[in-house]
Image (cartoon, rainbow, N blue to C red):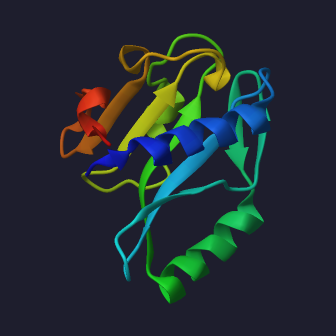
Amino acid sequence: MHIAVDTFLDAVKTMRACGQGRRECVVFLVEHADDGVLRVLHPEHGASSSGFELDQRWLGAFAVRQTHEQVHVQAQVHTHPGSAFHSATDDMWPMVGTVGFLSIVVPRFGNGRIQTDEIYACRLDIGGWQDVDFAALLQP
């Protein structure tokens, strides 16, 4: 899977606005079966400076929507307050637990100028999470 630069920048813009420089935020990169285009989806969630929690009602409604609209979550993108890494919570509770799912972590709540080498990305594999070169995921 590749991520258009504009789509990723939209994800970061959304997370910056939501987190306001003091709370984590999460977005999903979703693909609609009819056109295969990745779009940013900002779920309803609670958040603090050290984590986020998806709204359970939103999650249930989204599960129904996924079936009816054939929407597939390809990646979760979220922020951390400091450097980007995959925490134990990130390892245990991905939005999707299937092989190939991407998890991308953006440092500093998405604030300031962020270099691609500061962004952490990994892909779920049969043996667990495997590091991925984030820059290699981007396409113009």
Task: Report x, y in % for residue 55.
Answer: 75, 56
Task: Report x, y in % for residue 133.
Answer: 25, 26
Residue 73 to residue 125: above or below: below
Whether residue 40 sits left or right of residue 30 in the image: it is: right
| Residue 6 seen in the current view | yes
Farthest residue, direction top: 82
Residue at image point 68% right, 30% down: 51
Please give the count of numbered marks on the rendered protein: 0
Task: Report x, y in % for residue 129.
Answer: 29, 34
Residue at image point 57% right, 43% down: 11
Residue 61 to residue 117: above or below: below
Residue at image point 77% right, 36% down: 17
Of residues 83 and 128, the one nearer the viewer is 83
Whether residue 113 sits left or right of residue 8 in the image: it is: right
Of residues 34 and 26, the one nearer the viewer is 34
Task: Report x, y in % for residue 22.
Answer: 80, 21
Residue at image point 70% right, 22% down: 50
Whether residue 134 sits left or right of residue 107 in the image: it is: left
Residue 73 to residue 134: above or below: below
